[in-house]
Image (cartoon, helix red, strand yellow):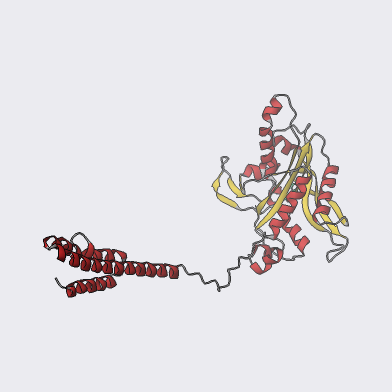
Amino acid sequence: MTTNELDFIVASARQAFAGAATPAELENAKAQFTGKAGRITELMKGMAKLSVEDKKTRGAAINAAKQAIEAALGDRRQALADAELEVQLKAEALDISLPGRLREPGGLHPVSLTMERIERIFASMGFDVADGPEIESDWHSFTSLNNPPNHPARSMQDTFYVDINGDDGIPYNLRPHTSPMQVRYAHQHIKKHAAAVQAGGAMPEIRVIAPGRTYRVDSDATHSPMFHQCEGLWLGENVSFKDLKVVFTDFCRTFFESDDLALRFRPSFFPFTEPSAEIDIQFQSGPLAGRWLEVAGSGQVHPAVVRNMGLDPEQYIGFAFGMGPDRLTMLRYGVNDLRLFFDGDIRFLRQFR
Ligand code: PHE
């Protein structure tokens, strides 16, 4: 065994390590030299036969070769680890010079803003806020509201019908107004307080607004087949038309932030109220000054409706109104075409953000 041979083994090890592309390959290469059956290990085993003198010189030479191989192995390990880190860093590189992605804040739809405003004002007057179905039974939309089948008053509303019959065999409808919420809510209210009443307590007054979507076969600059209404109902033992005037006047002045607003209750007809009135408002200044603008239908709840609620009309009286939040939104923001609200044009809607 010559020194040349050891040099050759060290050189082969360096070459094998350099050729290893991964840590696993490197460990395999290492095994060929310093592993259990490696070439250096074999040489060490062979030393047993040598004389004491030879053992010393050979041992030193083999050890030197082994150390050289281990140094080469360490260098290659480090190089592979560095390369791996490099790749990882590249893959995770962040280009911090890129401009950020701006997320523009969203905004509420103008009609939603109006709805929230209406809810806030009526809540401050002690009104509950209720929600109900948009697909309604014939009984809730019409019959319960003193509007029997075949009665001519039904043609006041050009109603959408759904291809499904209710229990009464009459098709469901897309509610043409929020008034079905009067009887629906009254039923919920009575049920909610039934136990307390049974125990001898008094039932609290019914005081609620019910905002939501409504539908009619109607379409022009001031009518959309889908539109919004907000029903109001206040029923108690002594709630009069005067209370309607006070509440609605208060509401309008708060909504439009103006005391300089005139209201007119114009006699009208609805099957579910008696007497009935159309409510008009008039601005005293601004671009709409002097014109009477219709904003709601209203009246004292008809005894037949109170009876359908399950209440005694001799005991419970009060008023109801149904107003158009779309109309209120147009007036508040000076928009002249209702359809703009429902076209979904972001340039229009963004202005209310
Ligand atoms: N429901 C009526 C309409 O849609 C409005 C109304 C509601 C009138 C409540 C009186 C009482 O025209």
Identify which residue, 185 or 74, lies in the foreground.
74
Identify which residue, 98 or 14, lies in the foreground.
14
338 left or right, relative to 94? right
Residue 215 falls in image quadrant: bottom right
Q: Is residue 139 above or below residue 87?
A: above
Residue 57 point in image, percent of width and height: 19, 67
What's the residue at 69%, 54% (across, down)? 228
314 left or right, relative to 56? right
Q: Inspect this view and state whether residue 137 appears.
A: yes
91 left or right, relative to 62? right
Identify which residue, 58 or 262, lies in the foreground.
58
Residue 53 point in image, percent of width and height: 15, 65
Identify which residue, 144 or 350, lies in the foreground.
350
Residue lying at the far front in this picture: please name it: 53
58 left or right, relative to 276? left
For the N terminus, give its image quadrant: bottom left
Residue 226 point in image, percent of width and height: 65, 57
What's the residue at 88%, 57% (across, down)? 260
Residue lying at the far top in this picture: please name it: 199
Residue 185 falls in image quadrant: top right
Residue 133 point in image, percent of width and height: 62, 46
For the C terminus, give its image quadrant: bottom right
